[in-house]
Amino acid sequence: MRARLIIGVFCLFTLFAGACASSQGSKNAWKGVRSFYGSHINKSVFLEVDNRVYCAPHEVALVRVMGGVDFQLEQLLRAMDDSDRSPDGEWAEAMFKKFPWLAAVALADGQGRVFESLPEKGGVNSVETLLNHKPGRNRTDLRALAREGRSGPEFLLAKPVYMQNELRALILCRFNLYDLLRLAGQPDKFVFSTTGGILWPAGYNIEETPLNGVDWENLGANHVDGTLSNARGEFYWLSTYFADLRLYYSLPVAGDF
């Protein structure tokens, strides 16, 4: 009996000593962590107002003339990305109200057959090109293409809808480039291109500019902006994306064009 009591007391003492050691270890660890506060953890916010990002004059000039267009395209991408799987008339009305430069909205099945379009005549057709996603893109990403329409260059934007790994539908919208360019402050000042070539030459004779003969498919492969020169002067270009379609905005920065 006495032996059992001694063993019990020894066990309790061992547990108590371990708890104390653990508690002391936790206290030491907390003290160590607390020493990092203010330097590595929960640092005070500091606004370095003197460290300003420099933008070259030609960069500012381009943004001023194309900013309105790029903003509207970005807003359209967000609206399409947030659209429901089964958009109705109310959704279409809201889209036309928010983007008055849209020409049509539509729904197509998984084979690219348009079965509903607003307006019904002259709406959206021939969307088979948008059935497959481009390499390097997720299949659920928005898809876009530029093509020559009845009233000039036009764009199609599609949101694919999948069910059980099968493409079931495309939510579509179409717009004419000229209607979109009306939102630009000075559309006659910049050239608008895609990987397929120049869609809007503005007021320039492209054959006299360094943009003539450019490989637009690969121009922005390694850089988002740059300059192109010839004997008459220099153009600055900027590349952005509209869904999976690369766009280019360009304007002269030197020379007489």
Image: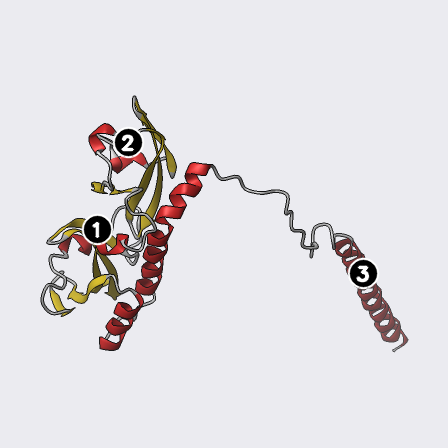
Q: Earlier in the sequence, mark 3 or mark 1?
A: 3
Instruction: Tally the numbered discs.
Output: 3
Image coordinates of residue 140 in percent, x first then y, are 29, 59
Query: Mark 3 highlights which residue?
Result: 27
Q: Is residue 223 visible?
A: no
SS for tag 2? loop
For the residue pair 7 and 228, the one nearer the viewer reads as: 228
Give the residue type at disc 1.
Answer: Leu
3D distance between C-alphas at marks 1 and 2: 30 Å
SS for tag 3? helix
Query: Mark 1 highlights which residue?
Result: 145
Query: Which quarter of the image is occupied by the N terminus?
Result: bottom right
Give the residue type at disc 2.
Answer: Phe
* Image: 3 above or below 253: below
Location of residue 193 by image quarter: top left
For the residue pair 70 and 147, the one nearer the viewer reads as: 70
Image coordinates of residue 198 in percent, x first then y, are 22, 40
In the displayed orientation, state which residue is furthest to the right: 2
